[in-house]
Image: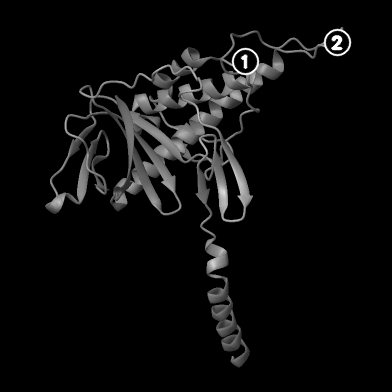
Amino acid sequence: MKYTYQYKALPSTDQKLEINLWLRICQYWYNRQLGERFDWWERNRTSVNSCPLVCHLPELRDRPNYYSQKKLLPGLKKGKVTVEWSGYDLDFSRVPANTLQQVCKRVDKAFDRFIYGDNNGNRSGKPRFKSQPRYRSFIVEGAGLTLHSCSTGGKFLYLKIPKIGLLKIRSHRHLPDGAILKQVQFIKKSDGWFVNLKLDDPTVPGITPDVIVPNWENSLGMDAVLHQEYYLATSLGGKLPSAKFLRRNQSKLAKISKKKNARTSRQ
């Protein structure tokens, strides 16, 4: 069975700088892929109701997809990439390859939901370019991920991540024995960094929900009464009394409010 636990990360100063750099590179790579797809989409489509007789013929090229954009990564890792609008140089070689490939999957999924929709035919809106406040997470996976518990009292865990080292995380929840770490997701929030640990426990069987056919024996009807001392009635003849917390404490709340108003008037 697969499940996910979230923990508070406590990175050092150098680790914070490296993690923020990874996030910045992933954000640029996401926007670049999305821009290439939008550019191809605008150049190679024509409105159904207005097809011009004379139009510009763009340079013919294949439609960008997950595999074609993933093939660009080895070339980007050979040297630094300069951001046009800021002039900042980004070194793609500092980020693991599987992390950048996860960004490719993220773009591919967002664009496919916009063009084709999901299995039920529901389409999402047009994907947005992500600014720094909007792009807040990236994924690390692979064989180099390991967990170490070597703190006093078990209050902390240490997560070994390639190119970052041992990352200290606060252990507020015990990890089950035998769980295998498959994936780590870094999430940047207002109060710091958090990590989502995706675990796989082969000893726990998967949940197979039973198919229940509704009938008179396994069904129960409920209705809101809102009359006198009751608020719910069932088809079996039972009634649940209303707690009425507000009415019971209304006089007490009035006294407290009166004292508060008296203090305010004195000041």
Q: Is residue 112 above or below residue 149?
A: above
Which quadrant: the C terminus?
bottom right
> How would you rate the neighbour count of disc 2 (Cα within 10 Å): few for under 14, some for 14-19, many for 20 or more?
few
State which tag comes first along the sequence, 1 or 2: 2
Q: Amino acid at mark 2?
A: Pro
Name the image quarter holding residue 157.
Answer: top left
Q: Nearer the viewer, residue 141 or 15?
A: 141
Q: What residue is shown at x 53% (from left), y 70% (from top)?
A: 249
Give the number of the disc on residue 52.
Answer: 2
Q: Residue furthest bottom?
A: 266
Q: Is residue 237 above or below residue 240?
A: above
Q: What residue is shown at x 61% (from left), y 84% (from top)?
A: 261
Q: Circle 2 — which element?
A: loop
Percent coordinates x, y for residue 113 in the rendering: 59, 21
Percent coordinates x, y for residue 224 in the rendering: 60, 44
Which quadrant: the N terminus?
top left
Q: For the residues marked 1 and 2, what is the alpha-carbon distance in whole angstroms?
A: 26 Å
Q: Amino acid at mark 1?
A: Tyr
For the question of whether residue 138 can be seen, the reply is yes
Residue at label 1?
116
Which marked residue is nearer to the observer: mark 1 or mark 2? 1
For the question of whether residue 90 can be seen, the reply is no
